[in-house]
Image (spheres, rainbow, N blue to C red):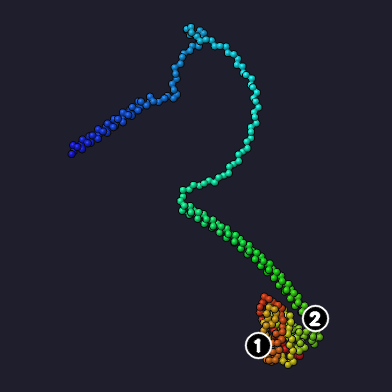
Amino acid sequence: MEDYKVNERQAGNERKARLSSIAVLLVLLAIFVFPFFTYPDPPPEQAGVLVNLGIPDVGQGEENSAPAAASKPEVKPEPKPEPPKPEPKVEPEPEPAPAQEEKVVTTEDAEAVRIRQQEAEKKRREEQAERDRQRQEEAEERERQRQEEAQRKAEAEAEAKRKAAEDARKAAQENARNAVRDAFGGGKGKTGTSGNQGDPNGDPNADKLTGISTGVGGGLSGRGVVARGKITDNSQKEGQVTVKICVDGSGNVISANFTQGGSFGAAASDATIRSRAIASAKKWKFDRNPSLDKQCGTITYKFKLR
């Protein structure tokens, strides 16, 4: 068995040796034979013929080249006139051929094309919706500005009307007060001087000769009076009766009640005098004030003996 392996290994080595020898021979053959298959560049010059041109007094021999023929002057021919060149024909430019749509050859399957088309359609709808939303917002903003402008104009007109009505009301009140002053301009009383006898803050329409005067206080002290209710009494009782009243925005008395605060004396204890004071207070009329729904104060009646 071991001899068989040795023989096989030896045979393999011999085969390798033969192959190596053949390869070396092929390489050497290529090196020596290859130059014979190449062409020199440039090619080698061909052998020429020696020509003796001959020079006097130099050289030997009887064969000389023939003398050169006398050169004649070169006569140049007269140039012929060139024929006129024909004018170039201007050919109309060909009209451009209508552009043809390039057909896109796609190798995508139908499902991929359908999905891409759906995405493109979805994007187009979203862009259109965004444009519509922007236009809607712009329209709403213009409408809001228009409404605000209309509201400002309406408020300005209402303010102008209110001011005109207020001016007219003040003018009417002033005329009414002037009429009252004119009616009592001569004065009443027994003092021998001009003016009305009684409390300086009292009612100019009151019966001063009976010693009754009125005054406004509380929250109504700064509100103008348009008309006053009259009151008379012959009971010869002194004292003070205070009536609490409330006035609406139009200047009308909406409530009147006797109050013990500020009331004293025999007049305050007399039920008849209190009833007359309340009835008189309900007939008072004050300046308008639309900004106030209700304003309360007091009317004080003072009773003095003659």
Q: Nearer the viewer, mark 1 or mark 2?
A: 2
In the displayed structure, 152 sits above or below 188; it is: above
> Closer to the N terminus: mark 1 or mark 2?
2
Q: Is residue 155 left or right of residue 20?
A: right
Q: Is residue 126 left or right of residue 155?
A: left
Amino acid found under the numbered disc labelled 1: Gln
Which quadrant holds the N terminus? top left
Q: Quadrant of residue 83?
A: top right
Residue occupied by mark 1:
260
Q: Secondary structure at mark 1?
A: strand
**Frontmost residue, 195 versus 255:** 255
Amino acid found under the numbered disc labelled 2: Asp
**Where is residue 239 shown, x and y percent of the image?**
70, 89
Residue occupied by mark 2:
182
Q: Is residue 82 left or right of residue 192?
A: left
**Frontmost residue, 254 versus 267:** 254
In the displayed structure, 184 sits above or below 16; it is: below
In the displayed structure, 43 sits above or below 211; it is: above
Q: Quadrant of residue 198?
A: bottom right
Q: Secondary structure at mark 2?
A: helix
* Contact, mark 1 vs mark 2 (Cβ under 8 Å): no
